[in-house]
Amino acid sequence: MNQAELYAIFNGADAARKEFALSAGGISKQFAMDRIEFDECEVDLFTYFTNLGIYDHLPKHVQENLPRGRRWICAAIDTRTRVILGIRVAAKPCAEEAVKLLRMVVRDKTDIAKAMGAESPWPFHGGLGMVACDTGSAFVSDEFISAVTALGGIMFFPPVKIPELRAGSSGCSAQSIPSY
């Protein structure tokens, strides 16, 4: 019997899994676009952008049209480079928004960056490798899965409550998106 099995007997399987989990940087990513994670979280946009320190730098037309109340931020990140490949704001998560986010992943977004007043381009895009998502309704929809498959991607739904199977993000939250 190995140490992990003994530990599980005395402390439980979940404790043993956490104790003996790999701690060498998480899941291996070989190259850019090898693994893309999609996630979503609900935030108040005004508070979120203010806390990030970017609200005052947004163009006036964006500030004036910023929806009030809580909205969902849906983001896609390349886990190798930690580059945000797409980000969408929606009233609620849905398959249509997930597919629009996927469309952002595979195209140059410099036009969006310029429209927002950014000084740098947003050229990051490419073909799909593994697409890792939680099991939210937008991501398990036939529309999203079909779009990923049509673009040559491979869908992956990591088991819930096992964060070491995520490539380094701790999920989408108001604190985690800026750190991508």
Image (cartoon, grey):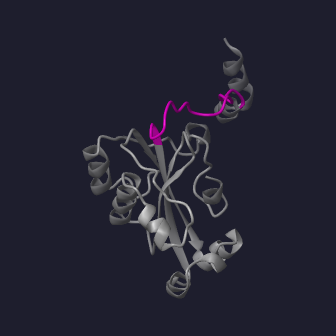
Residue 166 in percent (x, y) is at 56, 41
- Would residue 147 be found to the left or right of residue 116 on screen? left
Residue shown at 62% from the left, 79% from the top: 46
- Would residue 67 be found to the left or right of residue 131 on screen? right
Q: Quadrant of residue 100?
A: bottom left
> In this picture, is 103 found above or below 7?
below
> In this picture, is 30 found above or below 171?
above
Q: For this rendering, which residue is in front, 6 or 160?
A: 160
| Magenta span | 19-35
Question: Which residue is situated farthest in the top direction here?
Answer: 1
Q: For this rendering, which residue is in front, 26 or 12?
A: 26
Q: For this rendering, which residue is in front, 140 or 37?
A: 37
> In this picture, is 61 found above or below 155?
below
Quarter that holds the N terminus? top right
Residue shown at 47% from the left, 73% from the top: 115
Residue 172 in percent (x, y) is at 57, 57
* Residue 117 on the magenta span: no
- Would residue 41 be found to the left or right of residue 33 on screen? right
Residue 77 in percent (x, y) is at 51, 50
* Residue 33 on the magenta span: yes
Residue shown at 42% from the left, 66% from the top: 111
Residue 51 in percent (x, y) is at 70, 72
Residue shown at 40% from the left, 56% from the top: 108
Q: For this rendering, which residue is in front, 70 or 15?
A: 70
Q: Main secondary structure of the magenta part?
A: loop
